Amino acid sequence: MSTTDPTPVRLVVGAAIVDDLERPARLLSARRTEPSALAGGWELPGGKVDAGESPLSALHREVLEELGVRIRLGVHVPGPLPGATWPLGERYEMLVWLAEVVEGEPAPIEDHDELRWLELDDLRAVGWLPADLPIVETLGTMLRGPKRT
């Protein structure tokens, strides 16, 4: 009798980069260039956690590689899965943190061809990748805060 273990889930990290952690008004979006199945879709910057690497180290590395900037992290944006992760298909789960740029000017260096700052009331102005859309919706609610009358 043989048993087949399911493919382990791979951890991915994402940065919800805002213009100001204390008083956010805009969120940075990045348009993918690869792989071809994701090309043209918009996402939060980030990437895979390498073996032996902590999620926070991976996030700082990925943002520096992809955008050429250093960031300061804010709060973790909890997802609906155990471990407070967000589902990215069947093989990946993502941890997301709020962040702001502390050094450099974001540029689409690797894996992206365009960056766009989106006003919090206009987060759907780009075609988000389906897996990122629930995260973006949560961010919109979280960052706008309670409605004032």
Image (spheres, rainbow, N blue to C red):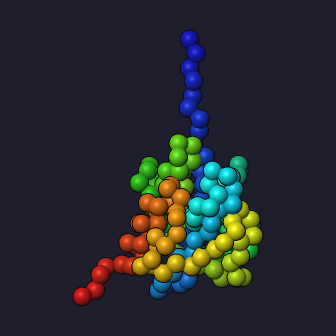
Horizontal and vertical percent position of residue 141: 38, 72
Q: Is residue 84 above or below residue 122?
A: above
Q: Residue furthest toward the left? A: 149
Name the residue at 36% across, 78% down: 145
Name the residue at 59% across, 35% down: 7
Q: Is residue 88 visible?
A: yes
Name the residue at 28% across, 86% down: 148
Q: Quadrant of residue 29?
A: bottom right
Q: Residue furthest toward the top? A: 1
Horizontal and vertical percent position of residue 128: 52, 63
Q: Quadrant of residue 106?
A: bottom right
Q: Is residue 54 visible?
A: no
Q: Is residue 23 above or below residue 30?
A: below
Horizontal and vertical percent position of residue 146: 31, 79
Indicate left or right for 74 with 53 as reference.
left
Horizontal and vertical percent position of residue 89: 52, 46
Indicate left or right for 92 with 142 as reference.
right
Q: Nearer the viewer, residue 28 or 69?
A: 28
